[in-house]
Image (spheres, rainbow, N blue to C red):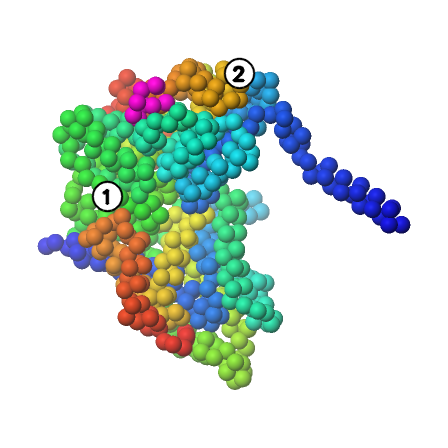
Amino acid sequence: MDYYLLAQLINGVIFGLIYALIALGLTIVFSIMRIVNFSHGEFYMLGGYTLYALTSGAVTFFSIPLSMPTIIGLPIAMVAVAIFAIAIERGMLRPIYTVRMDRPEEYAIILTFGLSLFLQYGALTAVGPYEMTPGAFWEGSKHILGDLYLAGDRLFATGVSVLLIAITIYFIYGTWTGRALMATAQNRVGATVVGINTVRMNMIAMALAGLLAGAAGAAMAPIFLVYPDVGQIPVIKAFVIIVLGGMGSIPGAVVAAIILGVVESLGSVYVSVAYRDVFAFLVLIGVLLFRPHGLFGQKERRA
Amino acid sequence: MTEVRNRKLLSGIALVAALAVPVSAVQAGETIKIGGLAPLSSPGSYQQGPELVLGLEWAVADVNAAGGVLGKQVELIIEDTQGRPPTGATVVEKLITRDKVVAVAGEYHSSVCKAEIEVFHQHGIPFVIGSCWSDSLTSAGYDEVFRTSVYSSKLAENMVAVMAANGIKKAAGLVEDTDYGIGIAKNIENAIKKLNADIDFQYEVVEKTSKDFVPILLKYKTKVKPEILIVAVTQPGGFLILKQAHEIRFAPTKETLYLDGTCTAQNDKVFWEAVKDAGNYVLMSCPYSPSVKLTELGEKIKQRYIDKFDRQPNYLPLQGYDAMISLLTAIKNAGSTDSKAIIKALKALKIEGTRGVIEFSQEDGVWHHQWKAVPTFIFQYTKVGQSSGDAAVLFPKQFATAGIVRPQN
């Protein structure tokens, strides 16, 4: 039996789920804070470098080489990136909400864009230009079906994506803090009136974005390597996904990511691999022509 | 009071002005300015750029240590071309018009070189290409453009010769969407016809920034079933293709060999760190062999690199050195910094570089101002973590130490 088409579909869905994890943090920050975080790709990059630093033995801590198992390094990398994201929110983004300023959105765009460049060039200077691969989460290639084998690490990253997407959806829709985040996304003034500390919600949103981007960067580092501009292309795809899914919609981001993964996978082999990165924009244009607010978008942005 | 304040102000301005005039500016009249080009930041291949710059800098340092050129020290101005053709053209314009360089050497990306040679041609300034391999650069026939690096059609002919000698009948290629990548695929097609080789070759152009190459690799594995996969995609894309070809058990395997056409695999420590066991049995096509004896100068440069970095150099520092030493020697031979005199001296040049005696052909087409005898090799790693110096040499015949080894899976 020819499993070729099915194999391509499975690979597309798997890659889509990986995209979803990257896009999720971006859409949460957008819906809560109403800013587009251009440095999200660098949060992803930091996740990968942190995992490498913790697990490869190349970095020493008080003369002891750090070579912890990758499975322990992953949550530490997530937390480290989340702390970094909180620091960015407190140190740089908070004035948007606490100080009266003209054009706060533009301030945020310029700031996060500058931060993105700073982190990329910082990594280039501090770590060097070369690609690094942390140790594996799940060694070897696993047979899926037909001629399709996939790296254990790719399957692990997919599992991490599914788990974190499920936890995030539960957190947003099933907990008090999640509902407070949604309320902040829907109406910041109204949320303040009913006693929600919206500034704290911003911090939680950034922390969540840091956790998810850090997880994506670390979980995917053994497959896609770590280098200074590793986050550049994934974050462009993430922007497409959040617009396609509907700005600020979490289910929309997940569905759009899977659609994108499948379209790229099938388009690569049935149209041309040369235009792989163009398919994302073709799908986006096609959907926006008929649904200007995206697949799951509404006129009022919401989490 | 006002006068005192003004005097203080004037002396302050004078002090600031004195401090602002850098030492190099003071010496500007006593230096010969040379430009150096390389990609040093994204989206260029910033992994390769610094290696090329190293060769350019070492050549200048050696010449300066030996007294300079025409009684003056050489001042090297390095510019980052970012792998973008418009940036390349802009920085060349800046080097020529603002910095007043007398000549330029370097560059890595063929697409960027293509934009740059137009500016050099317009201004009549000599340019020695450091490491752009596209045939179109020399076949443009510009009087100002010279090349000490290897060129695509030569590499393609070597690859076809190795495939034919090993009875390979079906080959597939993945090449990047650049002048270099598409050029090498076209040259393989031409070489198959030229050498009358019985090889069925097909290729696909990929975006070098892509992350997931599994769909196209799976298509090759299931539908095409080539005996060899030739990849002309620079890192990190090239490394990802290798990792993913290994991941889906496509190549390198007993059925399908893997050939890295970019020679990025030669940077052994970086290569093994990035691809780990996926790199075993990889073949690579390179313009330098660590296991073949270099010229006296080449051995000196190689040892300097090993002493500094504790690893074998790849071809880039040597290509950078050759480009710059050719240029500086031509200026010395010309006895002048006049562009026309330098170009004339480059045409007549014959010097020992790091990898052989460099002289530029006067023939037309791809050999126009090309170092025709530039060495090329094909190697194969046969152990995980192997040093590039220990890799088996497969081509050319006179240096071959082994035949192709296939994995036993």
Residue in the picture at 45% in, 42% down: B87
Where residue B160 appears, as percent x and y from the top left, is: 22, 29
Residue B135 appears in the figure: yes
Residue that protrudes farthest toward the front in the picture: B122
Q: Which residue is mark 2?
A: B335
Reply above or below: B236 against B316: below
Magenta stretch, main secondary structure, is: loop
Where residue A105 appears, as percent x and y from the top left, is: 51, 67
Is residue A110 within the magenta segment? no
| Most foreground residue, A116 or A87 | A116
Residue that protrudes farthest toward the right in the picture: B1
Where residue A92 appears, as percent x and y from the top left, is: 57, 62
Q: Quadrant of the C terminus of chain A?
A: bottom left
Residue that protrudes farthest toward the left in the picture: A1
Reply above or below: B268 against A133: above
Where residue B202 appears, as percent x and y from the top left, is: 19, 39
Mark 2 or mark 1, whichever is nearer to me: 2
Is residue B366 within the magenta segment? yes
Query: In the displayed structure, does residue A77 sit left or right of residue A18?
Result: right
Residue B392 appears in the figure: no
Please provide the residue range marked out in magenta: B361-369
Q: Quadrant of the N terminus of chain A?
A: bottom left
Reply above or below: A301 against B100: below
Reply above or below: A220 against B11: below
Mark 2 surroundings: few (<14), some (14-19) or many (≥20) residues within 10 A: some
Give the structural element (helix, strand or loop) at label 1: strand
Q: Amino acid at mark 1?
A: Glu
Callouts 2 and 1 close, C-beta under 8 Å: no
| Most foreground residue, A92 or B13 | B13
Chain bearing tag 2 is: B
